[in-house]
Image: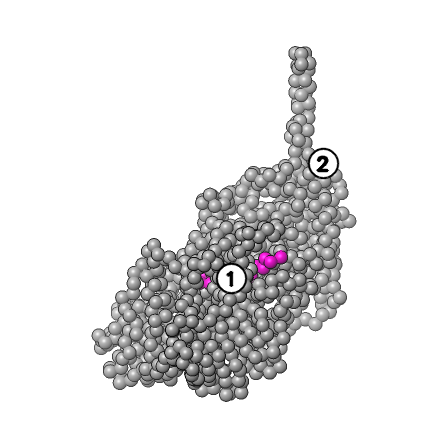
């Protein structure tokens, strides 16, 4: 090229750039255009409250070698990005992160953010502390964690979230739809994960969006518009990811620069929109613009979306604009369409063939149990905090509330986080517990009128699960007695059994009036000693100093929301005694038959290993052969498979069995039978790493089964998923019933889905469901119910049989992101062994139609055990405590049998939050499924109830205001909402009568203003 030509080129280029390159104003002001395909562009970031990193690591952006994620960056960069263009919008979901950020902001930023929220540019949706899992959490935890977030939002911003945004949880619970959806006042709920077969059918039928009626009892009065996304919660296909390190093509609209691609990007956008429109009703579709931990530099996304909106609208084939799920929901509603009806739930979830996400129903069973124990403790601790009066300076139950809320996240209690993150959740719970424990101790000292001069303190025994309780293992021979206080968090009087490790057998138990009560000493067996010694050292770093010889077992009677006290002292001091148990051991091969049981319930064991039992209840005339067995599924190892798209192992999420192996009783271990006046026990060693105990208590008609599973051997290189099967003769005809998040029961039919014709590819894993409360079978004569102490996966794979997955130890990852094998261990110094799980399930057989009563009442007892506290009393010294018993409610009153108290809490503004729940579904029980009524005055004796305000479930708005705003939807084939027979609900509370009516499955939430300072209803003098 000669010089003149070259200069010519230069001039030409400069000329173009001088003329063409200029500041561009993108028109982002579009809104809905009727008659056009409207593309709602919804910017969002999915920020897991712990998963691969801990919640704090995600927030501050540390530990980035695991995952480059910093939520602080998201929120920091969002503010200027939204300020730069008032048409831009964003939704923020996880309050655990938002609150961390909010607390650190200047007043100026806070003011700006408030303006952004009030203008609708920034919308807080879902609004709980986390996006809770829907399989493993108990509904009370779901309510609590949502309440915590919602009350913060109303306090700081005076807004109520309108939308449920459960985009990532692995299947969806009916309770989520009606309770954590409609009853908190949401207008819609959106989610990303439904079964791949279901999704395909719904795409064809344009039924991804439905009216979801999750409760049989509450029906249309508690329904919600629900949208499953066409694929996932990410941007549509075609390359629309704009994080700074994403490789999607950006919109290059500067004609001076190379690779100008506006038309190509517009075509991709329009094509994705038209595809989605083909599977969606109405002319509104949603593009979820974001995914995990995106918008860390928010401007990089908004810059591209500004351009897309601008050029797509110039193109004119579709109408694109910044939107939110609220705007989208309103548009769907305004379309006045009749929507398909969806009932029940979206479990189980498979994302493709052979990939059922039913393993996580059991993953990390110790964490699941810990969460459940803390949940119950939090409920009880808040009651005691209320009875004493909340302390301004602390300690409070707030940090336990926060830890529990975070633990409900869909990678926390689900068991699908990395190990160090699971440890972080447990650490938070432990810290929260310690503070709540001191709230409880202070409250008990107050309620027992403890003499401060004597400085008495109530100790508690969190480690009773590993048979460790220093408070009860004291030596009573040197002039001490042990006072045991049993607090009952239930609204009914309760007769229950207390079991404590004690070091000596020379003891007697007296009630608070000085009468000796029946007690029994059960010998402390080897399996407990091993479990105790190892775990005390692992947990506390030192071996226990005492060696308990016995469990002291006695029966206690405790008033509703109250306590009674018992005294344990040496027998010779009082002349009483605890009965020793009668112990017999059967050797292997010894054929024998033996019976255990008291009163109505008898179990007859009939083989040498005692796995076959005849269950006889003489009161109900129920006789049933029951067989208890254990098996394991060997975890599928797909390392050498070539199946597309990636080979599928069994892992933290996915349950993929590769054959089932019955575990035969083996070894020389005998069956031990222990009998006594209060409890009979049959101890069985199933194999070297599984043992179980069947217990029958005096006065109870269920069987308690305690199991110890672990350490699961893996020296054969195979992961194992251990299950127990409880078999009966019931002709259950492929049908079983499992609870939804601990509340409603849903009918399940093996190898069947009511929403589509199921292609069965995993006959075991595809029939697993989450069990939080229980599972039952029935035939024309009997009901066979099994209740659980934590969330497990379970099923009925064979008619008449209930199966529970108790533990999993896996050696491979299932390729869903966690990238770690679920191989939990417990270490003492440097030696680690596979995690051992100890737990309980309970079973009972009732005549057909009569099982609900036990499931509901006893289910509450399992969830809310007695809270035990211990104090020492020196003989001959004045009694440290002035009151031996207490009832927080009117002593003549107890809650109706079909009502549970879910929340009694003094809020930081002094108001009392009260939640009561009807425990029965319509038709579940002949008597107890009826309307019932609670006398609020009796719940607050000697206090004047000033004002009672009925609230939404999450207590962030008045119920009446919520009902007024509720969108009315049409359902296909049903005519309008109003015409259908609506479920009955309790009448408005009359401020004079102060009675709360409850209809089946209704939960009512009220804020109560109490006018007089607290005083306590009834305190008995300590006479012991
Ligand atoms: Zn997630």
Instruction: Give the distance between the C-alpha atoms of the residues marked 1 and 2, in whole angstroms.
Output: 54 Å
Residue 105: in sight, yes or no?
no
| Residue at image location 70% in from the left, 41% down from the top | 268
| Residue at image location 34% in from the left, 63% down from the top | 534
Report the magenta stretch's main SS. Answer: loop
Q: Give the residue at the far right of this rendering.
A: 35
| Pick the front one: 610 or 757 | 610
Which of the labelled discs sits on residue 263, or is there none? 2
Q: Nearer the viewer, mark 1 or mark 2?
A: 1
| Residue at image location 65% in from the left, 33% down from the top | 252
| Pick the front one: 779 or 321 | 779
Which of the labelled discs sits on residue 634, or is there none? 1
361 in magenta: yes
| Residue at image location 69% in from the left, 14% down from the top | 5
Q: Position of residue 648 (x, y in %)?
A: 57, 54
Residue 776, image quadrant: bottom right
| Pick the front one: 252 or 336 | 252
Q: Quadrant of the N terminus?
A: top right
Which segment did they paint magenta? 353-367
Q: Position of residue 686 (x, y in %)?
A: 43, 71
Q: Give the residue at the far front of this rendering.
A: 589
Say few, some or many: other residues with alpha carbon within 10 Å of mark 1 (under 14 / 14 to 19 / 20 or more). Answer: many
């Amino acid at each position: 090229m000669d010089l003149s030509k070259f200069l010519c080129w230069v001039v030409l280029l400069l000329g173009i750039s001088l003329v063409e390159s200029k500041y561009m104003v993108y028109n982002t002001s579009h809104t809905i255009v009727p008659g056009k395909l409207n593309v709602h562009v919804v910017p969002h970031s999915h920020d897991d409250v712990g998963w691969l990193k801990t919640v704090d690591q995600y927030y501050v952006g540390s530990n980035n070698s695991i995952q480059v994620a910093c939520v602080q960056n998201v929120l920091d960069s969002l503010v200027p990005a939204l300020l730069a263009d008032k048409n831009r919008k964003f939704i923020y979901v996880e309050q655990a992160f938002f609150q961390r950020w909010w607390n650190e902001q200047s007043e100026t930023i806070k003011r700006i953010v408030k303006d952004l929220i009030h203008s609708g540019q920034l919308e807080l949706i879902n609004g709980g502390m986390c996006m809770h899992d829907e399989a493993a959490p108990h509904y009370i935890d779901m309510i609590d964690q949502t309440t915590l977030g919602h009350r913060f939002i109303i306090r700081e911003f005076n807004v109520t979230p309108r939308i449920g945004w459960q985009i990532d949880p692995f299947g969806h619970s009916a309770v989520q739809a009606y309770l954590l959806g409609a009853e908190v006042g949401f207008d819609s709920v959106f989610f990303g994960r439904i079964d791949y077969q279901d999704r395909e059918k719904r795409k064809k039928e344009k039924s991804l969006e439905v009216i979801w009626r999750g409760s049989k009892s509450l029906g249309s009065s508690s329904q919600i518009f629900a949208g499953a996304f066409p694929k996932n919660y990410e941007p549509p296909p075609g390359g629309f990811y704009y994080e700074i390190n994403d490789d999607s093509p950006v919109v290059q609209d500067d004609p001076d620069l190379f690779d100008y691609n506006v038309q190509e990007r517009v075509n991709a956008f329009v094509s994705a929109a038209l595809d989605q429109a083909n599977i969606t009703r109405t002319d509104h579709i949603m593009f979820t613009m974001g995914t995990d931990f995106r918008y860390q530099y928010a401007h990089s996304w908004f810059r591209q979306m500004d351009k897309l909106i601008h050029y797509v609208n110039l193109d004119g084939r579709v109408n694109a604009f910044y939107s939110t799920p609220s705007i989208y929901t309103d548009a769907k509603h305004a379309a006045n369409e009749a929507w398909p009806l969806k009932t029940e739930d979206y479990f189980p979830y498979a994302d493709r063939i052979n990939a059922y996400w039913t393993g996580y129903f059991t993953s990390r069973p110790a964490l699941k149990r810990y969460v459940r124990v803390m949940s119950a403790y939090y409920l009880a601790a808040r009651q005691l905090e209320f009875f004493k009066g909340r302390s301004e300076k602390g300690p409070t139950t707030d940090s336990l509330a926060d830890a529990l809320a975070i633990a409900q996240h869909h990678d926390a209690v689900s068991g699908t986080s990395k190990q160090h993150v699971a440890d972080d959740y447990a650490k938070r719970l432990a810290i929260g517990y310690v503070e709540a424990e001191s709230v409880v101790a202070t409250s008990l000292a107050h309620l027992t009128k403890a003499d401060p001069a004597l400085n008495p303190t109530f100790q508690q025994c969190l480690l009773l699960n590993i048979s460790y309780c220093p408070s009860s293992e004291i030596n009573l021979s040197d002039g001490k007695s042990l006072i045991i206080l049993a607090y009952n968090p239930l609204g009914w009087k309760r007769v229950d059994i207390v079991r404590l490790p004690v070091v000596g057998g020379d003891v007697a138990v007296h009630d608070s009036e000085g009468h000796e009560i029946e007690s029994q000493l059960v010998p402390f067996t080897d399996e407990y000693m091993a479990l105790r010694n190892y775990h005390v050292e692992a947990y506390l770093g030192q071996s226990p100093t005492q060696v308990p010889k016995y469990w002291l077992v006695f029966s206690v009677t405790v008033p509703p929301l109250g306590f009674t006290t018992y005294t344990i002292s040496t027998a010779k001091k009082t002349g009483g005694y605890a009965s020793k148990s009668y112990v017999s051991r059967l050797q292997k091969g010894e054929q024998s038959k033996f019976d255990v049981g008291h009163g109505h319930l008898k179990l007859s064991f009939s083989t040498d290993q005692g796995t076959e039992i005849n269950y006889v209840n003489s009161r109900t005339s129920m006789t049933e052969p029951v067989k208890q067995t254990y098996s394991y599924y060997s975890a599928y190892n797909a390392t050498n498979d070539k199946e597309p798209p990636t080979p599928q192992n069994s892992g933290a999420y996915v349950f993929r069995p590769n054959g089932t192996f019955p575990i035969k009783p083996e070894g020389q271990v005998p069956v031990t039978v222990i009998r006594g006046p209060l409890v009979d026990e049959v101890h069985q060693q199933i194999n070297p790493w599984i043992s179980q105990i069947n217990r029958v208590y005096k006065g109870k008609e269920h069987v308690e089964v305690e199991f110890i599973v672990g350490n699961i051997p893996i020296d054969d290189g195979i992961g194992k998923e251990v299950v127990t099967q409880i078999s009966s003769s019931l002709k259950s005809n492929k049908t079983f019933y499992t609870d939804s998040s601990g509340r409603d029961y849903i009918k399940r039919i093996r190898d069947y889905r009511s929403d589509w014709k199921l292609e069965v590819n995993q006959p075991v894993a595809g029939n697993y469901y989450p069990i939080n409360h229980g599972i039952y079978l029935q035939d024309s004569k009997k009901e066979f119910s099994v209740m659980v102490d934590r969330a497990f996966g379970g099923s009925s794979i064979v008619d008449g049989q209930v199966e529970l997955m108790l533990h999993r130890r896996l050696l491979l990852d299932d390729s869903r992101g966690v990238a770690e094998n679920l191989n939990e261990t417990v270490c003492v110094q440097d030696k680690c062994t596979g995690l051992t799980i100890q737990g309980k399930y309970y079973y009972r057989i009732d005549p057909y139609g009569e099982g609900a009563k036990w499931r509901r009442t006893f289910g509450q007892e399992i969830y809310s055990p007695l809270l035990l506290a211990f104090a020492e009393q020196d003989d001959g010294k004045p009694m440290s405590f002035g009151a031996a018993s207490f009832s927080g409610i009117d002593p003549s009153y107890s809650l109706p049998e079909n009502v549970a108290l879910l929340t009694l809490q003094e809020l930081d503004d002094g108001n009392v939050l009260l939640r009561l729940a009807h425990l029965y579904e319509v038709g579940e029980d002949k008597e107890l499924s009826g309307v019932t009524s609670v006398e609020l005055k009796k719940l607050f004796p000697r206090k004047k109830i000033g004002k009672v305000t009925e609230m939404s479930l999450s207590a962030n708005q008045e119920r009446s205001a919520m009902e007024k705003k509720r969108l009315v939807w049409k359902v296909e084939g049903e005519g309008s909402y109003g015409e259908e027979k609506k479920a009955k609900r309790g009448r408005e509370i009359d401020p004079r009568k102060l009675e709360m009516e409850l209809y089946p499955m209704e939960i009512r939430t009220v804020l109560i203003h109490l006018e007089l300072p607290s005083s306590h209803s009834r305190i008995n003098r300590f006479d012991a």
